[in-house]
Amino acid sequence: MGERKVTVAAEVGLHARPAATFVQRAMKAPMDITVTKMNSAKAPVSGKSILAIMALDVRQGETVVISADGEGSEQVLDELAEIAGTP
Amino acid sequence: MGVSPGIGHGPAHVLSVSVPEPPEGATYDGEAEPEKERAMTALTQVAGELESRGHRAGGEAEEILKAQALMAEDPGLVVRVRSLIDRGLAAPRAVYEAFARYRDVLAGSGGYLGERAADLDDVRDRVIAVLYGIPMPGLQGAPEEPYVLVARDLAPADTALLAREHVAAFVTEEGGPTSHTAILARSLGVPAVVACPGATGIRQGARVLADGTSGEVRVEPAESDVADAVSANAARRAAYAEAGGPGRTADGHPVPLLANVGGPAELAAAVAAGAEGVGLFRTEFLFLGRSEPPGVEEQVRAYRAAAEAFPGGKVVVRTLDAGADKALAFLPAPPEPNPALGERGLRVFLRHPEVMAAQLDALAQVEGAEVMAPMVATAEEAAWFARECRARDLRRVGVMVEVPAAALRAGDLLSAVDFVSIGTNDLSQYAFAADRQLGAVRALQDPWQPALLDLVALTAAAAAEAGKACGVCGESAADPAMACVLAGLGAGTLSMAAGSLPAARAALAAHTLEECRLAAGAARDAVTAAEARAAARAYLPGLGRLGL
């Protein structure tokens, strides 16, 4: 299972625009993608659900773990990590 | 509440997005599959509409609408709608309930995320309207004259394609300073009033006058009132433009005007408004919504950004103001029956001294930062805080005066610190035993209450006697008449939201220090808040000339 740890850099956190960009990319991927907030009791959520990602309430400076498995997942993870880490 | 300054008037265009709540337990006739198909078609249609509006609008609106389109097609939501229909619920009710689950999570988070719940409601209402066959509210293309757009709340989809020249003002029943209406109005430069109860009851086409500075909304005003408001606004703008530069009275007594800042993002606006520094840098933004406190390095970066925005200017950083009234994940506070009266502000540090220590360590690395503690009540507390600061070589140390005990004994507090800063909102709350969150006791929160003015006067007098500084960093100074009175009571600096600075600067520049003192004395001699306001204004003739 591939995963990336990323600290969210956008000032608004992983909400609104950054969440939309993230989800748009994730939806193009053929495999399941999950997102977990580090040091949080919240369960992992689907990276393809903007509502679930917004509900995670990831603020600027917080770290998320993005996971995916299967062919091409490394490439997808790199791109998603890049989006989540962009200010 | 005025959230975008200026005067706007014109016929009311009332947006009545009154999509009814589908009845609880509503079921459908026929098979589940076609009902699911109906729901999916509506969701897809709304997503498509939002996206195409976004494309046409471009810019920030496009991003907001794209996010809303993704909400309509959210896979988690789709699964939930399908399973609710399988359980027998009709498509509109299933959509309503599926959205409700996410809505509650967002609304429960409060703040920025809480206001996104309105975006979600808008998507939901559009889908339900499609399912019911109710027409979507639309805006006229090019009206004969600019209209005042009135709504419960404005959704990005309604406003994305608005042309600046078609809209004279926005008036909404709901919303706050960070709602989409407010953000959009300020970016378009359109006057806006939000949180105006009963606004959607205004008759379609009625003449409306909205003052985005004072928050006043008038229906069917006399022609002469409109003319007066427009010319007063023009005079105001001219006066603001003329009274640039540092805050001072007409006879040259300096009253530095500083900004209250809630995070690094607000620094640019403070600089643009001509703030001479930051009188209150709130630090809660660094701590909110986190499971661990921010490290020293991260804090240094944030505080340094404030200091760098005002080279040579004053930057007063307030240590974390949290506790029972504003809970933080990593500072678990046992539930209290009266959170405003319990462990909050400086009191929290008695139990979690490491949080204050890290913050002071960070501040000690920032050249020029001054530091003050919130919610200080006694001389011992002030002395304890000052010792902790001095041990780190922090040179300018102060405390907030927000509790009547601190105002009454300001001299004792000042023997340990270099300055005091009066927080008029909390000082009102504690002086009148009136919760500042509670609408029912709002009248007691009036900064013109003579008892509050007495407490400010006592504090300022004690500071003058000690030869130390006394500032005011409550929003009360945003009222230009009050800014003059506070200067007259002896406040050395005034700090407020950046947007309020130009009016306060113009008001001060129009009066001598002696006039401010006379106004302050007259206000304190009054018995009620209304009398105090009227008495002070009688000594401040320049306000009328400025249209303030």
Image: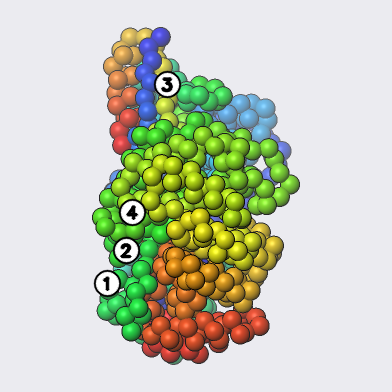
Residue linked to disc 3: A65
Q: Residue at x 62, y 84 (%)?
A: B526
Query: Crowding near pointer 1: few (<14 within 10 Å), some, many (20+)?
Result: some
| Any part of residue B24 in sight | yes
Q: Nearer the viewer, residue B194 or B265?
A: B265
Q: Quadrant of residue B295?
A: top left
Q: Between tags 3 and 4, which lies in front?
A: 4
Mark 1 belongs to which subunit? B
Q: Quadrant of residue B402?
A: bottom right
Badge 4 and badge 2 both on one subunit: yes
Q: How many marks?
A: 4
Instruction: Specify the label residue B276 is tagged with.
Output: 2
Query: Crowding near pointer 2: few (<14 within 10 Å), some, many (20+)?
Result: many
Residue linked to disc 1: B245
The relative height of residue B344 versus residue A87 in the rendered view (above or below) is below
The relative height of residue B145 versus residue B150 in the rendered view (above or below) is below
Mark 4 residue element: helix
Q: Residue at x 47, y 52 (%)?
A: B372
- Tell me which numbered mark, 2 or 1, is placed earlier along the sequence: 1
Q: Between tags 3 and 1, which lies in front?
A: 1
- Residue B330 at x, y = what percent? 55, 33
Mark 3 belongs to which subunit? A
Q: CA distance from mark 2 to mark 1?
A: 9 Å
Mark 2 residue element: loop
Mark 1 near mark 4, Cβ–Cβ under 8 Å? no
Mark 4 belongs to which subunit? B
Residue linked to disc 4: B267
Mark 2 belongs to which subunit? B
The relative height of residue B365 versus residue B1 in the rendered view (above or below) is above
- Tell me which numbered mark, 1 or 4, is placed earlier along the sequence: 1
